[in-house]
Amino acid sequence: MAFKFSTEIRRQQCFSGSLKSILDGCVLRIYSGPIPSGPDSALAGNDLLCEITAGGDPLTFETGSTTPTLTKNLSEIWQGNAVKSGYATFFRMVKQSDTGTNSTSEVRIQGTVGGPADDLTISNPTFVNGSPQRIEYFAIAVLEYA
């Protein structure tokens, strides 16, 4: 699978800014349950397992690169504690105010969670309430199509 970008991210990239400027200030939310058809779709039957922040603050990305890849700010520790037990199936990178409803005006990236074939590889997708979760590496590559 590949990251899915919301309508709002694509709109903002066209008219008002870089992907970095759009995503700085987001949080990463990890969910269980059926994966919505796309990032504009509402959450339905999903449980929030964990919200990843930078020590309680929103996440940011590195500035400057020689490649078309946006990477996690290496000075930040992206972590959170599981708020519910369950099996992680997908994530959304969102602004903190996002309520998960059906929307084409929310900044969202959606991807799968699990092993190496997924968008976000984690060592154990079974979350236990209260257990710490940490993201060591996160990158978004802007791919060239031939």
Image (cartoon, rainbow, N blue to C red):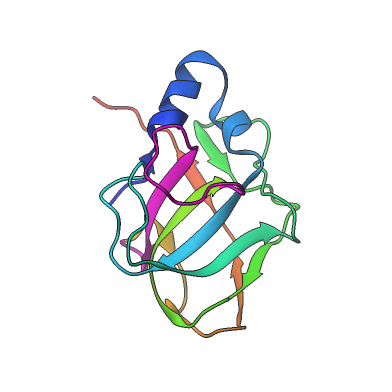
Q: Give the quarter of the figure containing the C terminus.
A: top left
- What residue lies at 50% left-to-right and 14% top-to-bottom? 15
Please tell me in which quadrant of the rendered image residue 136 appears. bottom right
Image spot of residue 103 (x, y percent): 40, 38
Residue 97 lies within the magenta run = yes
Q: Position of residue 70 (x, y in %)?
A: 55, 38
**Looking at the image, is 102 positioned above or below residue 45?**
above
Residue drawn where x is 63% and y is 29% of the image? 21
Say whether residue 124 is visible.
yes
Q: In terms of secondary structure, what is the magenta stretch mainly?
A: loop
Nearer to me, 16 or 46: 46
Determine whether 92 is above or below 55 in the image.
above
Q: Position of residue 117 (x, y in %)?
A: 30, 61
Residue at x-position 52% and y-position 32%: 67
Residue range in magenta is 95-117
Vertical comparison of 126 with 51: above or below = below
**Residue at x 42% of width, y 80% of height:** 86
Q: Is residue 96 magenta?
A: yes
One can see residue 65 in this view = no
- Taking the view exactly as shown, the residue that stands out farthest to the top is 15
